Amino acid sequence: MLKQSRLIFIVGYGRSGSTILDLLLGNSKKVAALGEVAYLTDAVWTSNHYCSCGKSASECEYWSAFKTKWELNSEITIESFLALEKRYSRLSGVTRLFFDKSIDSKSFNTYRKTVSNLYNILLELNDGSIAIDASKLPFRLLILRVLGFRPFVIHLVRDGRAVLGSLKKGHRANLEKGVQKALKPKPTIRVALGWGLANVFSELFSFGLNRILLRYEDLVTDPIFSLKRIESGAEIELHESKEIIVKNLPFIKRHTITGNRLRMSNEIRMVKIPDESWKKSLAVKDAKLFYILTMLLLKRYNYLK
């Protein structure tokens, strides 16, 4: 497992503010904001994504150092690790992971050791002792638990109608701006089911772990209180992150290669006003359909007044 360090896992659904939370936490000493670790190896080795520094993975000094450290410290090749990721990271792979654990298979033990090594290399590069994994995927959290990790969990939730409004906007592919492929507007039913299931599984798979539920709207409107909740729950210090908020300073940029295109912005600050443009842009029929399909969860997370 991680060497004398802690893991914080941000779980939830896309477009819920995980990138801004990850970057904010990463501005504190000894806290390494790693982005979406679930997609990291593909971004660095296979797809050559652009880092937030503006360079591609193959040109970035940070990610070049990461690859060098991997080759020196890992017992398996990156190709072998990618194969294990493919074996276990899919929905069907979770069942295989449980089975391989039950028989103490070589593949399971190799995967567990390599995932831990991945976090340790990133922590060493960031001079950190606390790792932030903003992968969001509930099944990624389940996989980590099966591997023996017990992270502190931040279940980040955003009003699903705001998420729908965001996903209704298409985006053209632009690698340099962090958009890896063209994004088409998503159907309402698909978003409603995805948002609902992701949050239900987030609660289910984090049960029994030290966790907090954090609404994106509360993070934005009162970031200091939100940071204090994380400090208390994770038993860490976030002094520098709070200072940035109090003094309205820009975030210190790190080498983030996965996550929302926000990471590519020249300057990032916390805007203490939640984005509610969906109230004007979202079609009434879409808002009503989403409400009908998700009203119980909207009520659970206090989005119905």
Image (cartoon, grey):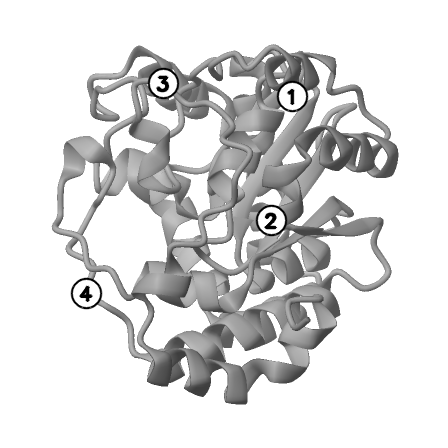
Q: Earlier in the sequence, mark 3 or mark 2?
A: 2
Q: CA distance from mark 1 to mark 2?
A: 23 Å
Amino acid type, callout 4: Lys
Are the residues at dot 1 and dot 4 in contact (C-beta closer than 8 Å)?
no
Q: Which badge, 3 or 1, is on the more N-terminal residue?
A: 1
> Is 300 left, or right, of 15 in this rendering?
right
Front tag of 3 and 2? 2
Q: Disc 1 versus disc 4: distance between alpha carbons? A: 35 Å
Q: Residues within 10 Å of mark 2 (few under 14, many from 20)?
A: many
Please state which amino acid type lies under the numbered disc 3: Glu
Mark 4–mark 2 CB contact (< 8 Å): no
Mark 2 secondary-structure assignment:
helix
Q: Compute the Cα span from label 3 to label 1.
A: 20 Å
Residue at image x 69%, y 39%? 8
Mark 2 = which residue?
A: 217
Let me know if residue 263 appears in the view.
yes
Please tell me in which quadrant of the rendered image residue 41 appears.
top left
Q: Closer to the N terminus: mark 1 or mark 2?
A: 1
Q: Quadrant of the N terminus?
A: top right
Task: Please give the residue where the numbered disc 4 appears in the rendered image.
Answer: 184
x 57%, y 47%: residue: 110
What's the CA distance linking mark 4 and mark 2?
25 Å
Disc nearer the start of the sequence (4/2) = 4
Residue that carries the numbered disc 1 in the rendered image: 31
Pick the front one: 62 or 160? 160
**Which SS class for mark 3?**
loop
Q: Residues within 10 Å of mark 1 (few under 14, many from 20)?
A: many
